[in-house]
Amino acid sequence: MKKISFNAEYEVYEDETQLPPAAKKLLQKAKEACQTAYAPYSNFKVGAAVQLANGEIVKGSNQENAAFPVTICGERNAVFAAAAQYPGVQIEAVAITAETVSKELKKPVPPCGSCRQVLFEYEFRQQQPIQLILQGDAGEVYIVKAVKDILPLLFDASYLKK
Ligand code: THU
Protein backbone atom coordinates (compact mmCIF):
# COMPACT_ATOMS: atom_id res chain seq x y z
CA MET A 1 0.00 0.00 0.00
CA LYS A 2 1.14 3.51 -0.71
CA LYS A 3 -0.43 6.88 -0.12
CA ILE A 4 -0.70 9.59 -2.72
CA SER A 5 -1.36 13.16 -1.68
CA PHE A 6 -2.39 16.19 -3.70
CA ASN A 7 -0.93 19.62 -3.44
CA ALA A 8 -3.25 22.42 -4.55
CA GLU A 9 -1.57 25.75 -5.06
CA TYR A 10 -3.06 29.18 -5.68
CA GLU A 11 -1.98 32.77 -5.29
CA VAL A 12 -3.65 35.15 -2.84
CA TYR A 13 -3.70 38.87 -3.58
CA GLU A 14 -4.75 41.38 -0.94
CA ASP A 15 -7.29 42.96 -3.27
CA GLU A 16 -7.85 43.69 -6.98
CA THR A 17 -5.50 46.69 -6.98
CA GLN A 18 -2.59 44.25 -6.66
CA LEU A 19 -3.55 42.35 -9.84
CA PRO A 20 -2.02 42.64 -13.30
CA PRO A 21 -4.24 44.99 -15.39
CA ALA A 22 -5.70 42.21 -17.59
CA ALA A 23 -6.82 40.20 -14.55
CA LYS A 24 -8.30 43.30 -12.91
CA LYS A 25 -10.26 44.10 -16.07
CA LEU A 26 -11.58 40.54 -16.38
CA LEU A 27 -12.72 40.60 -12.77
CA GLN A 28 -14.59 43.83 -13.46
CA LYS A 29 -16.34 42.10 -16.38
CA ALA A 30 -17.31 39.22 -14.08
CA LYS A 31 -18.83 41.73 -11.67
CA GLU A 32 -20.84 43.22 -14.53
CA ALA A 33 -21.99 39.71 -15.47
CA CYS A 34 -23.08 39.13 -11.87
CA GLN A 35 -25.73 41.82 -12.34
CA THR A 36 -27.32 39.76 -15.13
CA ALA A 37 -27.86 36.72 -12.90
CA TYR A 38 -31.38 35.39 -12.55
CA ALA A 39 -31.38 34.03 -9.03
CA PRO A 40 -34.80 34.63 -7.46
CA TYR A 41 -34.71 31.36 -5.50
CA SER A 42 -31.25 31.39 -3.94
CA ASN A 43 -30.57 35.13 -4.13
CA PHE A 44 -26.99 34.05 -4.82
CA LYS A 45 -25.70 35.73 -7.96
CA VAL A 46 -22.64 34.43 -9.79
CA GLY A 47 -20.89 36.21 -12.64
CA ALA A 48 -18.10 34.90 -14.84
CA ALA A 49 -16.03 36.43 -17.63
CA VAL A 50 -13.99 34.41 -20.10
CA GLN A 51 -10.84 35.89 -21.65
CA LEU A 52 -10.19 34.46 -25.10
CA ALA A 53 -6.90 34.48 -26.98
CA ASN A 54 -8.49 36.57 -29.77
CA GLY A 55 -9.07 39.40 -27.26
CA GLU A 56 -12.79 38.79 -26.84
CA ILE A 57 -14.37 38.61 -23.38
CA VAL A 58 -17.53 36.53 -23.01
CA LYS A 59 -19.71 36.93 -19.93
CA GLY A 60 -22.16 34.60 -18.22
CA SER A 61 -24.20 34.39 -15.04
CA ASN A 62 -26.26 31.83 -13.18
CA GLN A 63 -29.79 31.32 -14.46
CA GLU A 64 -32.16 29.62 -12.06
CA ASN A 65 -35.36 27.74 -12.71
CA ALA A 66 -38.47 26.89 -10.69
CA ALA A 67 -37.45 23.29 -11.34
CA PHE A 68 -34.32 23.84 -9.23
CA PRO A 69 -31.98 21.15 -10.67
CA VAL A 70 -32.09 22.59 -14.18
CA THR A 71 -30.49 25.81 -12.95
CA ILE A 72 -27.20 26.52 -14.68
CA CYS A 73 -24.18 28.03 -12.95
CA GLY A 74 -22.57 31.27 -14.05
CA GLU A 75 -19.24 29.66 -14.90
CA ARG A 76 -20.79 27.08 -17.19
CA ASN A 77 -22.98 29.63 -18.92
CA ALA A 78 -19.95 31.80 -19.62
CA VAL A 79 -17.65 29.05 -20.87
CA PHE A 80 -20.34 27.35 -22.96
CA ALA A 81 -21.21 30.70 -24.55
CA ALA A 82 -17.53 31.38 -25.28
CA ALA A 83 -17.04 27.94 -26.84
CA ALA A 84 -20.21 28.27 -28.91
CA GLN A 85 -19.48 31.79 -30.17
CA TYR A 86 -15.75 31.32 -30.72
CA PRO A 87 -15.16 27.61 -31.36
CA GLY A 88 -11.53 26.59 -31.25
CA VAL A 89 -10.31 29.88 -29.78
CA GLN A 90 -8.14 29.32 -26.74
CA ILE A 91 -9.52 30.23 -23.32
CA GLU A 92 -6.84 32.07 -21.35
CA ALA A 93 -8.62 32.91 -18.12
CA VAL A 94 -11.97 32.91 -16.37
CA ALA A 95 -12.82 35.45 -13.67
CA ILE A 96 -15.55 34.46 -11.23
CA THR A 97 -17.37 36.54 -8.67
CA ALA A 98 -20.55 36.30 -6.61
CA GLU A 99 -22.85 38.30 -4.39
CA THR A 100 -25.73 37.46 -2.10
CA VAL A 101 -28.29 39.38 -0.09
CA SER A 102 -27.78 37.53 3.18
CA LYS A 103 -24.14 38.38 3.84
CA GLU A 104 -21.02 40.03 2.57
CA LEU A 105 -18.84 37.57 0.66
CA LYS A 106 -15.46 38.43 2.13
CA LYS A 107 -13.70 35.43 0.60
CA PRO A 108 -13.47 34.41 -3.06
CA VAL A 109 -16.14 31.96 -4.21
CA PRO A 110 -14.61 28.92 -5.93
CA PRO A 111 -16.45 27.10 -8.75
CA CYS A 112 -18.55 24.06 -7.83
CA GLY A 113 -17.36 20.57 -8.74
CA SER A 114 -19.54 20.36 -11.85
CA CYS A 115 -18.17 23.66 -13.14
CA ARG A 116 -14.59 22.54 -12.46
CA GLN A 117 -15.26 19.43 -14.54
CA VAL A 118 -16.71 21.52 -17.39
CA LEU A 119 -13.89 24.07 -17.24
CA PHE A 120 -11.36 21.25 -17.27
CA GLU A 121 -12.91 19.78 -20.43
CA TYR A 122 -11.82 22.93 -22.28
CA GLU A 123 -8.41 22.92 -20.63
CA PHE A 124 -7.88 19.33 -21.77
CA ARG A 125 -9.17 20.13 -25.26
CA GLN A 126 -6.83 23.06 -25.75
CA GLN A 127 -3.86 21.48 -23.93
CA GLN A 128 -3.16 24.87 -22.34
CA PRO A 129 -3.95 25.91 -18.78
CA ILE A 130 -6.94 28.12 -18.01
CA GLN A 131 -6.25 30.61 -15.25
CA LEU A 132 -9.01 31.25 -12.71
CA ILE A 133 -9.39 34.62 -10.99
CA LEU A 134 -11.72 34.54 -7.98
CA GLN A 135 -13.13 37.26 -5.75
CA GLY A 136 -16.16 37.71 -3.49
CA ASP A 137 -17.65 41.16 -2.95
CA ALA A 138 -14.24 42.69 -2.32
CA GLY A 139 -10.94 41.92 -0.66
CA GLU A 140 -8.75 38.92 -1.35
CA VAL A 141 -8.37 37.62 -4.87
CA TYR A 142 -7.27 34.05 -5.55
CA ILE A 143 -5.49 33.13 -8.76
CA VAL A 144 -5.44 29.47 -9.72
CA LYS A 145 -2.95 28.73 -12.51
CA ALA A 146 -4.83 25.81 -14.04
CA VAL A 147 -8.21 24.13 -13.53
CA LYS A 148 -6.51 20.76 -13.04
CA ASP A 149 -4.81 22.18 -9.93
CA ILE A 150 -8.16 22.28 -8.12
CA LEU A 151 -9.57 19.04 -9.55
CA PRO A 152 -7.40 16.22 -8.23
CA LEU A 153 -7.85 12.65 -9.49
CA LEU A 154 -9.91 13.99 -12.33
CA PHE A 155 -11.81 12.20 -15.08
CA ASP A 156 -10.94 13.21 -18.62
CA ALA A 157 -11.42 12.04 -22.20
CA SER A 158 -8.28 9.89 -22.12
CA TYR A 159 -10.23 7.18 -20.23
CA LEU A 160 -12.72 6.93 -23.08
CA LYS A 161 -10.15 6.18 -25.74
CA LYS A 162 -7.90 3.23 -26.36
N1 THU B 1 -23.80 28.67 -8.53
C1 THU B 1 -23.00 29.07 -9.56
O1 THU B 1 -23.45 29.82 -10.45
N2 THU B 1 -21.73 28.62 -9.60
C2 THU B 1 -21.16 27.79 -8.68
O2 THU B 1 -20.04 27.34 -8.86
C3 THU B 1 -21.91 27.45 -7.47
C4 THU B 1 -23.35 27.79 -7.47
C5 THU B 1 -25.18 29.14 -8.49
C6 THU B 1 -26.22 28.08 -8.73
C7 THU B 1 -27.41 28.63 -8.01
O3 THU B 1 -28.10 29.48 -8.91
C8 THU B 1 -26.82 29.47 -6.90
O4 THU B 1 -25.46 29.70 -7.24
C9 THU B 1 -26.88 28.81 -5.52
O5 THU B 1 -26.33 27.54 -5.52
Image (tube, helix red, strand yellow):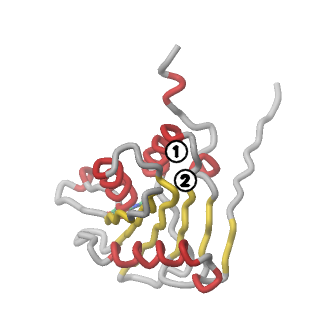
Give above or below for 49 relative to 16: above
Q: Which mark is residue 108?
A: none
Instruction: Name the quadrant where ligand 1 sits.
Output: bottom left
Q: Amino acid at mark 2?
A: Ile
Give above or below for 28 relative to 59: below
| Quarter of the picture holding the N terminus | top right
Secondary structure beneath dot 1 equals helix
Secondary structure beneath dot 2 equals loop
Residue visible at 41% across and 66% down in the picture: 49
How far apart are labels 2 and 1 at the CA level? 6 Å
Residue visible at 28% across and 71% down in the picture: 37
Q: How many marks?
A: 2
Q: Amino acid at mark 1?
A: Glu
Residue visible at 18% across and 54% down in the picture: 67
Crowding at mark 2 (Cα within 10 Å: few <14, some 14-19, many 20+):
many
Asked if the residue at tag 1 contacts the one at tag 2, i.e. Cβ–Cβ closer than 8 Å, the answer is: yes
Beta carbon of the mark 2 residue lies under 8 A of ligand 1: no
Residue visible at 53% across and 13% down in the picture: 162
Which residue lies under the disc numbered 2? 130
The spot of residue 31 in percent (x, y) is: 40, 77
The spot of residue 106 in percent (x, y) is: 54, 81
Give above or below for 12 relative to 69: below
Which residue lies under the disc numbered 1? 123
Give above or below for 26 relative to 1: below
Front residue of 54 and 35: 54
The spot of residue 137 in percent (x, y) is: 47, 82
Label 2 vs 1, first from the N-terminus:
1
Q: Residue furthest right?
A: 2
Left or right of residue 20: residue 155:
left
